[in-house]
Image: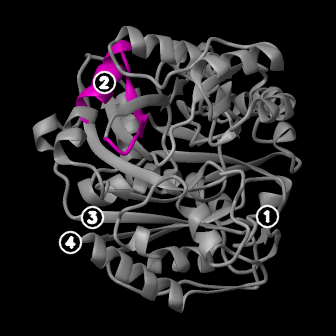
Amino acid sequence: MEKILVANRGEIALRVIRTLKKMGIGTVTVYSEPDEPLPFVREADHAFCIGKGPVRESYMNQDRLLEIAKKNGVDGIHPGYGFLSEDAGFARRVMEAGMVFIGPKPDTIALMGDKLAARQAMARAGVAVVPGSPEVGTAEEAAEAAREIGFPVMLKASGGGGGIGMALCRTEEEVYRSFQGVQSRAKAYFRSGGIYVEKFIGRARHVEIQVAGDARGNLVHLFERDCSAQRRNQKVIEETHSPLLSRNTRERMYEAALRAARAVSYENVGTVEFIVDEAENFYFLEMNTRLQVEHPVTEAVTGIDFVEWQVLLASGKPLPKPQQAIVHRGHAVEFRIYAEDPDNFYPSPGVIEKLAWGRGDDVRTDAGYEAGNRVTPFYDPLIAKCVFHGKTREDCLARAEKFFAETEIEGIKTNIPLLRGLIAYPPFAEGKYFTDLVQEYQREKGGKGDEKN
């Protein structure tokens, strides 16, 4: 491919553009009106305004995207993550227009994007799934399913992801109270009101396995990431290796992830997500058929550029490395920097008046903003990802604390105070934490905690 359109924004658009340039591939990007001053627009060879701020009028406007792609003679479209990255219909339209969709096949995206269908496919493949129900159409059906499964349960959108479209319910009353809200969010975000009920596993770890496959049927795993540090079911810290998993469980999870990928003839880069209980039983959650926000953690320990792999695999090339040549070196931790109030997680839009990152060795900062840019309320408030690589986990955390102590951001609130608090919080510092980490930390420091987590 000689020219690729990057159909995204912010830090991920900038990150993809830089790899494409390294590969000698021409870059085209699109931007919304409020995003025009952002660095990714300046970095691309060509940039075109796609519409106003709201995503439906800009980054989700498929017709306008394809129009720009055709006029500029691009060979392929890289969707980044979010937006249209897991839209099977868009992937088909890209291919029908004679361009390459840089991701898996549309049929695979459609199958794994339907959480219920994905659960069924995994069960047939012999991959354990969390106990759950078929699709439920009413609150009454959901309550009945919850009684059969046993409380607590999660209400989940069958087309959901990213922590959106789900609610924890500990009683029947909470099922009735939450059902309509979950269904409404599912329709708004995923254009489907499909809901199912799933057993909630308390004191759990959220662990995902990175995989990659080529058109010849070859598959590899690229180790695991622990994503248990979350707020409102969305990740804030990721690391590899997972500090609490035994080597035996880790190896069995690699095998299960490859079995899952093989069951759907997976091509390109993807991630199989699992929930792991205290006894190290693990269950399939979902498969993300795209680049993950946290992919730099794995890049740090493997030295592999995942965007480069995506492009090569989408071009029909074989896997660049066999399994035995993929080596995990040291430890890496990624911290997501959000423009938000660190106490209640409310977004903090505004102009970034000052932005000065800390210093340190083996630190990678993927930032979508610079001083003078405005964080708007139209998009996810992620402004950067900071990845620390070292020989040990302790090295990474020490570097992170020093880095964040030196970082200065003015004009908006960020979650850096929360991240620094977690670094020093014994359960996290010792690697003995679960998905309720942030909630417990806030309770202990005297806050209300994140009741939605």
Q: Which residues are magenta?
A: 254-279
**Which structural element holds mark 4?**
loop
Near mark 2 (Cα within 10 A), the count class, few <14, some 14-19 or many ≥20, is: many
Residue placed under numbered mark 1 in the picture: 346
Instruction: Identify the image quadrant of residue 161.
Output: top right
Amino acid type indicated by mark 4: Lys
Q: Nearer the viewer, residue 25 or 55?
A: 55
**Do the residues bearing badges 2 and 3 touch, measured as CB atoms within 8 Å?**
no
Q: Is residue 425 above or below residue 210?
A: below
Task: Please indicate whether residue 283 sits to the left or right of residue 199 in the image.
Answer: left
Residue placed under numbered mark 2 in the picture: 214
The Cα–Cα distance between marks 2 and 3, rounded to whole angstroms, is 27 Å
**Which structural element holds mark 2?**
loop
Amino acid type indicated by mark 3: His
Q: Is residue 318 visible?
A: no
Amino acid type indicated by mark 2: Asp
Residue placed under numbered mark 4 in the picture: 391
Q: Which residue lies at the image location 50% right of the left edge and 35% below the top edge? A: 290
Quadrant of the snapshot with the N terminus = top left
The disc, 4 or 2, on the residue closer to the chain's N-terminal end is 2
Residue 76 rendering spot, x and y as whole percentages: 53, 31
Q: Is residue 186 above or below residue 324?
A: above
Residue 442 rendering spot, x and y as whole percentages: 64, 70
Q: Looking at the image, which residue sits at the far bottom?
A: 406
The Cα–Cα distance between marks 4 and 1, rounded to whole angstroms, is 35 Å
The disc, 1 or 2, on the residue closer to the chain's N-terminal end is 2
